[in-house]
Amino acid sequence: MVRTTSWISRRTALRGAGAVVSLPWLEAMGPRMAWAEGGTAETAAPNRMAFLYVPNGINMTDWTPQQEGTEFQLPEILKPLEALQSKLQVLSGLTADKARAHGDGGGDHARALSAFLTGSQALKTDGTNIRLGVSVDQAAAARIGDRTRLSSLEIGCEHGAMAGNCDSGYSCVYSSTMAWRSATQPLPKEVNPKLVFDRMFGADQSPDRARRDARRRSILDYVREDSKHLSLQLTPGDNRKLDEYFTAIREIELRIERVEKLPPVKTPDYPVPAGVPAEYETHIRLMCDLVALAFQSDVTRVVTFVLANEGSNRPYPFIEVPEGHHDLSHHGNDTGKKEKIRKINLFHIRQLSWLLEKLNSIQEGTGTLLDHCMVAYGSGIHDGNAHNHEDLPLLLAGGGCGTLTPGRHVKFASETPLSNLWLSMLARMEVSWDQIGDSTGPLSGL
């Protein structure tokens, strides 16, 4: 096959019968400009950002590397990331000051999640007069969201109420929602993988959709003619990449179908949410694969993912932790309880590893999808027993299209605002934004 002399638009999508399938990055889409601050871009791939949140703090003894710089060893909790250590930064010393009480009394869990991406102090209320600030993901979405099918994607693995009192007088919305479009507009997360998939690919919501599902046809059936026309314009390498991409889409469709057929797994003392996989790990990994697919297809470049709500008391019997997570986080320095917290932390890191390995397995130009991403992972609480918000557990994975220097443990000065990290990430998305909450300026040394 011979490639046409004209570039294919990055916005090109395959369409048919109510379905829209965005394309992955292809060589035929051409080069992009180098990063505004002087970095060089290896390929035409765009930069992406994802934010993953875990609740109730971390067993920090098994989290923080003893060495700084490039010659650091991953502690026990971070061991599942060993194969990707060269594409990872462990960040120490960052603080979410606005998660502290500042005279508002109890409610550290609500403040921890609400302040994490906003750097803002939540108005203490369990009524409708909620107030916070714009989160970093929505700052990015406001500037670059018009370049993709979805300006941003908000997902999670635990349902959360948008009203009511969930933490010492704070509205439930604060402890279950990470993305805020404005000070008064939280963006609820979607926990059903099927609905996320449908949103990504524009599945028809009419009665015809039910008939289509009954026939168990793939969404790819509806864009097949369009894809045949496109393949004539592509190189063999691009066609191979397109085949791999379609295979990934179909594999996720089949997994969703299997989940819908399987009977729910009984989990002690935990009501399984309807419409989502009964097994927590299955649920997380399916969502992780959807994140990778969203980035690969350029459906969106901005994702927030709450693995569990702040203050979550989910038990983990499948890793021999039948007690609730939140209850255990108040460990009182009990060795047995801290060991169980470590097991939970390790489980969550294994899920992050799943996502990063998936991103790193997808070739994109001369690099991988992970090379063209920034994936931030962490918690708004340092230690669940102390409820403190300084020296937070934070990881930053990916190369940011050549704008990051991974493979290091970076220690920042005490009380450095977490929001400074978010400003730094926005700059690498070529987004100009004056301030995120309590930020004082971009971080140096990333």
Image (cartoon, rainbow, N blue to C red):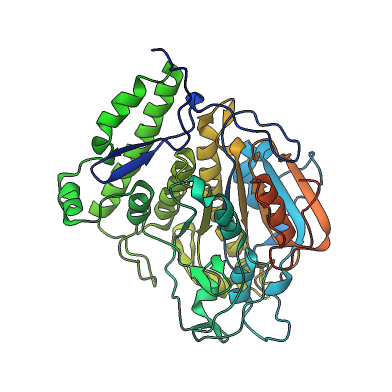
Task: Please provide percent x and percent y for residue 105.
Answer: 67, 86
The answer to whether residue 327 is seen in the rendering is yes
On the rendered image, what quadrant is the N terminus found in?
Answer: top left
The answer to whether residue 330 is seen in the rendering is no
Q: Is residue 302 above or below residue 169?
A: above
Q: Is residue 6 left or right of residue 206?
A: right
In this rendering, the count of numbered labels is 0
Task: Please provide percent x and percent y for residue 109.
Answer: 60, 74
Q: Is residue 255 left or right of residue 8?
A: left
Residue at the image point whose x is 75% and y is 42% from the top:
408
Q: Quadrant of residue 326?
A: bottom right
Task: Please provide percent x and percent y for residue 233.
Answer: 39, 20
Q: Is residue 422 above or below residue 201?
A: below
Q: Is residue 189 above or below residue 82?
A: below
Residue at the image point whose x is 35% and y is 43% from the top:
252
Residue at the image point whose x is 50% and y is 75% from the top:
173
On the rendered image, what quadrant is the C terminus found in?
Answer: top right
- Residue furthest to the top: 1
Viewer-nearest residue: 6 or 381: 6
Viewer-nearest residue: 208 or 96: 208
Viewer-nearest residue: 313 or 213: 213
Q: Is residue 87 left or right of residue 146?
A: right
Task: Please provide percent x and percent y for residue 349.
Answer: 57, 51
Q: Quadrant of residue 106?
A: bottom right
Q: Quadrant of residue 120?
A: bottom right
- Residue furthest to the front: 6
- Residue furthest to the right: 413
